């Protein structure tokens, strides 16, 4: 069996004997669906969920802020942002529009990254501002969230006459799903606010009863998020559906669509191969617990997970990288769990996820972006190719071991 695994901006090929394959977990292929993407976007604007159309909401509004995703997310902003701004200016032709990049705790986008994502012409015409979670003067305190955290949100967003957000919906390993309210928290929230929110524990594909989601939706309400626009993407990163309107209702509609399309039953195996879906999510190791999550639902006790991620941008976070090198998985997990929520260190949630997984399973990291010494210092097993990783996995679990393959570990929701 030959399987193409998303990796960086292309694919790497994997060969496995048919008799060793326990199963391949994928969402239904949609390559044959060639509906016009712009028409999908415009049709969603014509039928908002739980809200008036954006053009009507914009009437009389002068200061408008549109939150958008940064370079680590696959939102097709070059397509969606101009249509969003067109709808806004239908209702308020003279609106002063600011595009606020929801970096969360990530670094700001460079000009080159903005031009690649939004288009050179768009960048020349529009005002685009990077959110900075570490600028103490940039926030408004809106009160207390259900977790007890202060709700500190970027004042540009809070002081807008109309606050709009765009994004895309995919399974998320603790927010349940990305998109919607997540543009506000963590997107344009303070470091402290994000830290406490992310210290809670939740699982993929769950909103109700999810403490992280409850904080996020309340933060969106307090910030005055009036309208969201979210797309869903296929395996080629093409728009296959779009939902817009009320921050909760429209987002939930998109999540239900995705759950129906992406939910798969687990296939148990001693070896599970997964990826972080290729570029842009496999730019760094910090993002990779997302692709790992699906594999954790399939691997047998004591088994091996092979995770392929290019990591062209390295580790992705100073705290994450430093903490991952500070001890054994057991020591790392003990240290994180002993940290009070208000003392949470940025990025420790990914350390916790990796440490917990490394205690239970051997994880082989296939990467060309990280040195072997760094990978092994973080308690992973290094492999430069998938073939090398499979050979090492068979040596650990036995030559008769079965292999489950999840070509895109971010795109599927494995039912627990």
Image: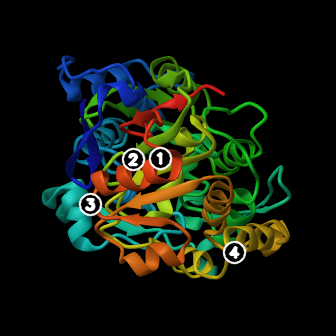
Query: For the residues carrying marks 4 and 2, which lies nearer the camera in this image?
Result: 2
Residue of label 2: 275
Counting residues from the start of the chain, the first of labels 4 and 1 encountered is 1
Label 3 to label 1, Cα distance in Å? Answer: 34 Å
User: As drawn, is 195 to the left or to the right of 396?
Assistant: right
Q: Nearer the viewer, residue 363 or 41?
A: 363
Contact? badges 4 and 1 (CB < 8 Å): no
Based on the displayed image, in which of its 4 quarters is residue 266 positioned? top right
Q: Secondary structure at mark 2?
A: strand
Q: Which mark is residue 126?
A: 3
Q: In front: 381, or 291?
A: 381
Q: Residue furthest front?
A: 399
Closer to viewer: mark 4 or mark 1: 1
Query: Residue drawn at (53%, 41%), measured in percent from left and top?
Result: 295
Q: Earlier in the sequence, mark 3 or mark 2?
A: 3
Q: What residue is pinned by disc 1?
A: 291
Q: Earlier in the sequence, mark 4 or mark 2?
A: 2
The colour scheme used to paint the residues is rainbow
The label number, if any, that marks residue 345 in the structure image:
4
The reply to whether discs 3 and 1 touch (Cβ–Cβ < 8 Å) is: no
Q: Secondary structure at mark 4?
A: loop
Q: Earlier in the sequence, mark 3 or mark 1?
A: 3
The secondary structure type at the circle numbered 3 is: loop
Mark 4 vs mark 3, foreground winner is: 4
On the image, the x and y values in percent for residue 128 come to 33, 64
When asked about the image quadrant of residue 154, the answer is bottom right
Q: How far separated are the C-alphas under marks 3 and 2?
A: 35 Å
**How far separated are the C-alphas under marks 4 and 2?**
26 Å
Q: CA distance from mark 1 to mark 2?
A: 5 Å
Q: Are marks 1 and 2 in contact (CB under 8 Å)?
A: yes
Instruction: Give the quadrant of residue 90.
Output: top left
């Amino acid at each position: 069996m030959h399987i193409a695994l998303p990796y960086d901006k292309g694919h790497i090929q994997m060969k496995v004997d048919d008799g060793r394959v326990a199963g391949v977990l994928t969402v239904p292929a949609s390559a044959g669906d060639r509906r016009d993407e712009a028409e999908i976007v415009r049709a969603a604007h014509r039928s908002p969920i739980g809200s008036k159309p954006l053009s009507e909401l914009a009437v009389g509004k002068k200061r408008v802020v549109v939150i958008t995703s940064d370079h680590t997310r696959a939102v097709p902003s070059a397509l969606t942002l101009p249509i969003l701004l067109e709808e806004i200016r239908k209702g308020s032709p003279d609106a002063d529009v600011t595009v606020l990049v929801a970096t969360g705790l990530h670094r700001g986008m460079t000009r080159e990254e903005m031009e690649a994502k939004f288009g050179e012409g768009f960048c020349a015409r529009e005002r685009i501002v990077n959110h900075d979670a570490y600028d103490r003067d940039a926030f408004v305190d809106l009160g207390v969230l259900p977790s007890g955290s202060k709700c500190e949100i970027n004042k540009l967003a809070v002081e807008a006459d109309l606050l709009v957000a765009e994004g895309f919906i995919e399974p998320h390993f603790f927010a349940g799903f990305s998109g919607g309210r997540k543009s506000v928290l963590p997107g344009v929230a303070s470091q402290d606010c994000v830290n406490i929110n992310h210290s809670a524990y939740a699982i993929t594909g769950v909103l109700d009863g999810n403490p992280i989601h409850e904080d996020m939706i309340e933060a969106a309400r307090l910030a005055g998020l009036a309208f969201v626009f979210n797309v869903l993407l296929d395996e080629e990163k093409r728009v296959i559906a779009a939902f817009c309107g009320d921050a909760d209702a429209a987002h939930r509609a998109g999540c239900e669509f995705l759950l129906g399309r992406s939910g798969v039953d687990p296939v148990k195996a001693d070896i599970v191969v997964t990826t972080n879906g290729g570029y842009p999510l496999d730019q760094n190791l910090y993002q990779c617990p997302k692709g790992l999550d699906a594999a954790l639902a399939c691997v047998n006790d004591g088994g091996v997970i092979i995770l392929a991620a290019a990591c062209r941008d390295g580790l992705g976070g100073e705290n994450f990288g430093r903490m991952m090198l500070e001890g054994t998985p057991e020591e790392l997990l003990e240290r994180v769990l002993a940290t009070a929520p208000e003392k949470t260190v940025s990025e420790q949630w990914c350390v916790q996820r990796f440490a917990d997984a490394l205690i239970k399973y051997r994880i082989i990291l296939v990467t060309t972006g990280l040195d072997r010494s760094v990978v092994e210092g973080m308690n992973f097993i290094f492999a430069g190719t998938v073939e090398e990783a499979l050979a090492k996995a068979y040596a650990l679990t036995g030559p008769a071991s079965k292999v489950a393959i999840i070509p895109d570990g971010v795109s599927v929701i494995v039912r627990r």
